[in-house]
Amino acid sequence: MFRWVLHKLKGDKIIWILTIIIALTSILAVYSASSAMAFRIKGGDVEYFVLKHIILIVIGLLVMFAVHLLDYRVFARLTNLLLMVTIPLLVYTIIQGAELNEAARWITVFGQSFQPSDLAKLTLMIYLAKLLTQRQDVIKDFTDGFLPALFWVTIICGLIAPSDLSTATLMFIASMMVMFVAGVDMKYLGVLMAIGAIGLVILIPTAKRSVTWESRWDDYAKRISSTDYAGNYQTVQSHIAIATGGVLGKGVGKSSQRNFLPSANSDYIFSIIVEEYGLIGAFAVLAMFLLLLFRSVSIVTVSKTFGALLACGISFLLVLQAMMHMGVAVGILPSTGLTLPIVSTGGTSIIMTCVSLGMILSVSRDAMEKNKGKTTKKGIFNRLARA
């Protein structure tokens, strides 16, 4: 049965297997992490949140399957339309978006909350992949090769940053990595970094969330510079969860910090995973995301086509977000509010992550079909590299 299912799935089977394993892991993690919140909000209905999460996971996997059957080149033709939709949505979110902790990140569509920044992440990566592929002949030129990419990275990240600096930073770093892979001159990437730094200097003291950002950075600076500083409440509870997990963990559903840790099912779900599954579970999750990155980036090893850069950019986004989430949980990064892709609760995040993975699989499916019947010494990695 398992082999039959794998046969029906196209593209890189390892990416499929990783996604399914991560999704199954998320169900157990959400069930445990949401129990305390269920008693506070739903009168003890523990199944409510996990059933909702399972439904979203199933929908996401179906969307992923549908997207991976599409020709990924269709997304290149949709870039202008995506920009025409994304930019107004981001502007509307700034003006009329629902606020939480002084952050306007959500809008309501057909009665459902939607985070436009999740769409913006994909839009930017698709646009950059298309632009950098088309301009390979002038990629070292400032005006023709670098400036158009700089313009849209600045616009999209600039619209997101006032209310969601962590997501804007994530997109900015991923964009730089894609531009580096595409062959943009290092001195121009230095210019991009300088523009980002200037933007932060202007934004931090003027944005509505400046107090929140300054508080987080102040807490982080004190935490890493002083051995006596305990940290804020969230940080302390996260560290307790990780420290008490040990090597093997407490066991499935036996977390105690879920009762104290805010956003245990979203922003700090990795802490709950470590508490229940221990250091082994933590390394397993980390390894799955790193393997996902390896399988995706292998497509770009000797090629700078649209598909290769698209898979590269999307995988950078997903894995960087996962690394930042884990970094916050263990205390090596300040609080960001970034979720763990697929694992954390959140409808928009899960669906858009599955769309992203579907695009990567579409690229690998096309590469494998082109090279069907050919054998190489290095197997699938060589075949993907020639996509």
Image (cartoon, rainbow, N blue to C red):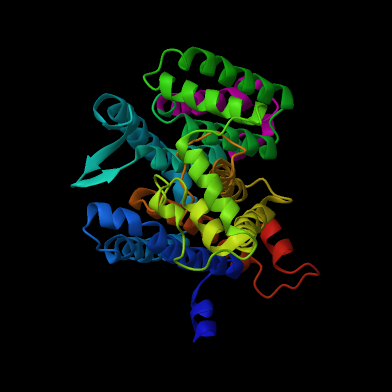
Q: x, y percentage for residue 67?
A: 43, 59
What's the residue at 32%, 26% (across, down)? 102
Q: x, y percentage for residue 186?
A: 73, 27
Q: What stretch is highlighted in magenta?
A: 133-159
Q: x, y percentage for residue 337?
A: 45, 39
In the figure, 10 relative to 4: above or below?
A: above
Q: Main secondary structure of the magenta part?
A: helix
Q: Which residue lies furthest to the right in this view?
A: 377
- The answer to whether residue 63 is visible is no
In the figure, 172 relative to 361: above or below?
A: above
Residue 150 in the magenta stretch? The answer is yes
In the figure, 10 relative to 221: above or below?
A: below
What's the residue at 70%, 27% (across, down)? 140
Residue 92 in the magenta stretch? The answer is no
Count of number-bearing discs: 0
Judged left or right of residue 346, residue 215 is: right
